[in-house]
Image: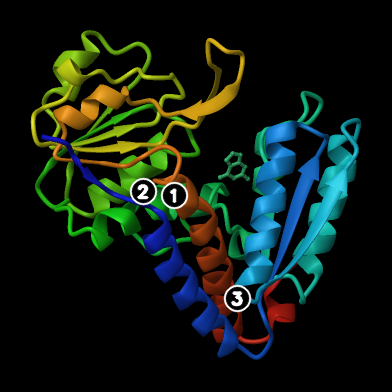
Amino acid sequence: MSARVLAGPPVAAALLADAAARASRLPALPHLAIVRVGDDPASVSYVRGKARKAGEVGLRSTVHALPGATSQAELLDLIATLNRDDDVNGILVQLPLPAQIAEAAVLHAIDPRKDVDGFHPLNVGELWAGRPALTPCTPAGIMSLLAHYGIPVAGVRAVIVGRSHLVGRPLAALLLNADATVTVAHSRTHDLGAVTRGADLLIAAAGRPALITPEMVKPGATVIDVGINRVLSAAGKGHLVGDVHPEVASVAGALTPVPGGVGPMTVAQLLANTVHAAEMQVQAGAVGELVR
Ligand code: GUN
């Protein structure tokens, strides 16, 4: 038996079509500002992908590519300018940042109403309080994927492997808000397999290639693979692998592929968040009154 494949692209397409339709009903097309500092190849590629997809669905985007030696004060100046700019609805600062810049200082500086990553402490707090908030893109994308494929969440035992601020922690809040029974496991968890075998819904978000092996999975469980690990094959060619071993497909009931599973959901959710931010800003009145 092979697991049902939970493909990301059709779900991402539906989310993008909805975002595009909502964007077209706004007084101005939503505008996303993307800030990148330095030339980390993965960040360059991710930012290019986000800007391209924004254009494809009819959103406006501006990429601010700053040199790797940019100081924290210079980056905070740019964020203050973007916060004040009525024409900017969403702000994303691509992570990771160079060592001379404190990530927390930057994420705290973004106007929470333009925080399309959902990383500002106000949005983090609202999410954990179970109130509406701009929500981190990968976890929100996973929730859309589960809903699209009719995977039950309420009442199930969900185990998340990984406690990052980008994925594990916010996903725990979203699953809890959707009435799952949530366990967050991590690199210091004792007997990880005993914990993961209890999961009806297992989410691997540890950033460790093939960490989840077949004997760690309950037969019939739904397995969501968030890993995007670049590894070299024996022939020296680079390719992408997930956190889930391919043989898990013979045990799981349903499984997201890598690539083509969770990955496409992240960008789609970012653009949906940008439209949502713009809608809220329009609803709250003139954007100029909202920002400092
Ligand atoms: N780097 C890797 N993933 C993300 C993300 O979701 N948002 C931002 N801003 N940076 C990232």
The N terminus is located in which quarter?
Answer: top left
Q: CA distance from mark 3 to mark 2?
A: 23 Å
Residue tagged by mark 1? 125
Q: Is residue 108 above or below residue 160?
A: below
Q: Nearer the viewer, residue 272 or 134?
A: 272
Task: Identify the residue at horizontal 45%, vertical 77% (top origin).
Answer: 18
x and y, in percent, of residue 37 in the image = 81, 39
Cβ–Cβ under 8 Å for marks 1 and 2: yes
Q: Quadrant of ligand 1?
A: top right
Residue tagged by mark 3? 278
In this orientation, does residue 96 appear?
A: yes
Q: Helix, strand or loop at disc 1?
A: helix
Q: Give left or right: position of 271 versus 135.
A: right
**Depth-wise, is mark 3 or mark 2 nearer the camera?**
3
Task: Identify the residue at horizontal 77%, vertical 76% (top origin).
Answer: 87
x and y, in percent, of residue 54 in the image = 65, 66
Residue tagged by mark 2? 128
Badge 3: residue crowd in 10 Å (few <14, some 14–19, many ≥20)? many
Q: Amino acid at mark 1?
A: Gly
Q: Amino acid at mark 3?
A: Ala
Task: Identify the residue at horizontal 32%, vertical 55% (top origin).
Answer: 145
* Residue situated furthest front in the rendering: 235
Disc with the residue nearer the chain's start (3 vs 2)? 2
Q: Helix, strand or loop at disc 2?
A: helix
Badge 1: residue crowd in 10 Å (few <14, some 14–19, many ≥20)? few
x and y, in percent, of residue 78 in the image = 85, 53
In this orientation, does residue 91 appear?
A: no
Disc with the residue nearer the chain's start (3 vs 1)? 1
